[in-house]
Structures are given as C-alpha cells and as structure tokens.
Amino acid sequence: MSVSITVKNQDQTATRLAIEDGKLAIYALGDKSDTKTIELECIYGIDLHEDKIDIHTAVVQDAATEQTEANANQTLTNIRPKDAKWILHTLHYQADTAAAATEASCSLSEFVTQFKGQIAPHHLAFPETEVIVVLNPTSGARLAESQWTSIVKPMLITAGFQESNLTKITTEQDGKTRALAKALGQRVLSTTDSSKPAPIIISMGGDGTLHEVVNGLSDAAAVTDSKGHFRLAVIPAGSGNAFALGLSIESVEQATLKIIKGLEEKPFYFMDVKFGHSEHDRGWEDHVEYDETKNPIRLLVVLSWGFHAQIVSKSRYLRYFMGNKRFSLVAMFLLTFLQQYEGELVLKKATTYNKDKGEFDEAPHTVTLEKDTRFTYFVVSKQHSLEKGFKIAPFASCLSEDMDVVVLREADKDKLTKASIAAFQGGEHVKSPSVEYFKAKELLLRVEDKAEICLDGEIHNVPSKGIVHMKVEKSSTEKLAFTIFV
C-alpha cells in the first residue's frame, strides 16, 4: 500500500514523502530525478508536533576489514573485520499548507498513523509492554551503561514504549546474575496477565551475560507451576557477541531495531550439558557416573577444549586493554608452544560434512573417535561465528536442532594457522583436509588428562577421565513459550 504526503524540509523546499515497496522515498516535488530512499527497517519512530513531523532513523555505515597488508600477507593479527558503525539521525519536516489545499493527499496525522503501522506493526501494544533489561556494565569495552542511556532507552521511548515501563537490572559477579534472572523469571511467570503483552527481557552484555540470563530464566520455569512466555531480546555489548551475530545482529542500534520491529519471535535451541566420569575402557559412554551436585548448564554458544579453550583462558585478563585483538595475540603465542590433547569422542545422530559436495551426508549415524586420539582444536558450537568474521562453524544456527562440531587432530602450527585464517575468510577452513566437521544431536567427550574447557566464555576444570555429555534441547516446552527476537 502506497502512502504519500507533501511537506517542507528545513530549507522550505516542497518535498514529497512516499512509502512504497518497503522504503521511504524522499524527493523534491515534481522531480524524482534525485530521490533519496531509506529502508523502513531502518526507521524506528515518527513524531507529530502540531504541523511538524520528525522521522527517526538508524543507518549503518560500510564496515571495512582491519587489514594493513596485502591478502598474501594475512596473519591472525591483521585479518579481523572492523565493527559496523550505525548512525542515529532525525529528519525534520513541516506541513505544506499550500500543497494540502490543492492535492488529494492524506493529512499529517493520517500519514503518521499509517507510517507507524508500517514501521512497527505492533506499535499499539508498546505503551502497555514492560521492558526489563539485564545489563552488564563490565562487558566488552564497558560501554553498556552509556549505550543504554544514550541509544537503547531513547530509541524505545521514541518508538512508543513508556519510560515508566522500562526497568534496568544490573548484573552481579560470582554467578549471582543467574540468581537475579531466576528471581526475575519467577516474578514474570507469577504475574502473567493474559490481557497485556508479555514483558520483553533484554540481555545487554556479552555471551556470558546471556548465558546467565537464559539459565536463570530456565531455572525459574523449572520451579514455577505458572504457564507463561519469556520474550528474550539480545543487545550485544560484549567482546564476541556470538549469539547476536548468529541472528545477524552486529550493533546496539540494530538490536534495538529488532525489538521495535518485533516482526518475528522464534523458539531457539541450546546445548544441555552434564558432567560425569567413567573408568571403563570400552563402552565407557554407556557407563557414565554423573555429577548430580552441579546446576544444569544450558550452552547457547560454545564448548571448546584444547587450543581454543586455552586462548580464552590465557586472554581473559587482557579484555579491558586489548579488545578482541587479544585473541589473535594469545593465539600466536600458543602456536609457538602448540600442544595436543588426548581424549575420546562419541557423536550420536551425527552427519559428516562432505567437502566434495559442500553439504552434510543425509543419513544420521554414530561417529566414534576412540582412545589415543590426539586433538589440537575442538569446538562444539550453536553459532556460526564466535566473534565477528571468525566463522568457525559456518552452518550452525541457534534455530536448528543440532550442534556443529569442528575438530583438528594432530595438526601442526602451519595447518592450524591456515585453518584459523580460512575461518576468517567466510568459513573456508571446512574445505581443508585437516578439518573435520560434523553435526550431531548428542555428544560425549572423555578427556584423558585433567583439562580446562570453555563453556560460553567461562573456564571450567574437568578431571582425568572426566566426561562432558551434551544434548540439543528446545527452549519452548509444553509449559513455557521461550522465544527470541529474530
């Protein structure tokens, strides 16, 4: 449906505004030769003040790759892409009374009403919708607090959310955020009002913050009898922001647009993790003694062991000084003293990536990598990228019911370096003979020696003969609708 109106811009030039084909077209009256267009998905609000209208936009600038040398000299330290930069801008117009008197055009108020319906179909529900942000002020570059105040909150209010319905909860250290999220979830489930929109819960931080929020909300669902709906949104303010990247969200502004547009909410899949051990030499996967003292762990991003886990472990104290560059520098150091890690792996309901066909084999089967297997690199991921540009599992998605497993065995420095660089080149590493790539619905890993593993960015210790057992689970159940803004 096309909607249009004639207005005057700031220099009093008669200007035509037309909504057509998912865009706002702006051109001088009677002259379409110089038409400027803005995608409606980049417009988050429109205000009417008597005879004036303000149109609020968030537009991305082109991002370049952070390279200082020619492609032939790419290394792990110069291949990382730059972050996309978004600009908030407001267009100001006023009514053109002369044009309104001579043409069959809608009024300013009619234009604004129809415009709002096209840029945010659910805008009429915004004033009644509660928004709770769980904000981590120490994530990434420690900008979340200022970004909430200067970007997210103003965008939501401009779109039509009421400031009185916006609540901020600040995260706490030492695992207390999970308890905060549990208490929040219990409150949301116990106060559900079917006559009002379900609250929107925003995780504003990194993947670690999101991990705590989802686990806490899931804990609440497990102990609450009330049925309800968790509507989860992710605003990336961390270092890697892998979950957001998996939803094609690269900035705070873009994530806020997703909430305002509210076009689609879907259940997602996570990896349920249990720990145990087994002393059996053969058939150990069928004789696991599980540790029932640990809280359930639901992974949204990654489990890693070996080289990748050591990068996370050794670089965690550098994040406030070096940003994501710390990963590349620590990786270069670890390559000098490259280690192998012995273990055993069983993948159930698995498919193997066929490098010749560029697709996964169709028939699910069990994959077993037995004792004395020496792993260099071991990653299990629900996201295609662990940081921007690093597409380690190019076919992974939080919306699919499997997990992606990427393995290098007994790789030397040269093979691992080439694979890592290829991962920054659109995930081309999966075509390499040295890289094994699987999809599976269930996984058991037994480590031979005491090891550090990375779970969504946090380091955990696993004892000798320790087992990590993972299954893919769906967020929504018969009891709870648990969805994410996509």
Image: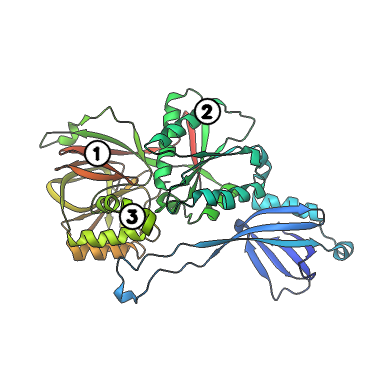
Q: Choose mark 2 or mark 1, whichever is in front.
A: 2
Name the disc covering residue 318, or none: 3
Let me know if residue 358 appears in the view: no
Amino acid identity at mark 3: Leu
Q: Amino acid at mark 1?
A: Val
- Residue 468 numbered mark, or none: 1
Q: Nearer the viewer, residue 237 or 71?
A: 237
Q: Please state which of residues 27 and 255 is positioned toward the viewer in this rendering.
A: 255
Q: Residue at x 48, y 56 (%)?
A: 250
In the image, which disc is placed on residue 187? 2
Q: How is the image coloured?
A: rainbow
Q: Which percent across, then down, holds residue 427?
A: 34, 61
Q: Position of residue 463 (x, y in %)?
A: 18, 38
Q: CA distance from mark 2 to mark 3?
A: 37 Å
Mark nearer the viewer, 1 or 3: 3
| N-terminal label among 2 and 1 | 2
Disc 1 and disc 3: Cα gap in Å?
28 Å
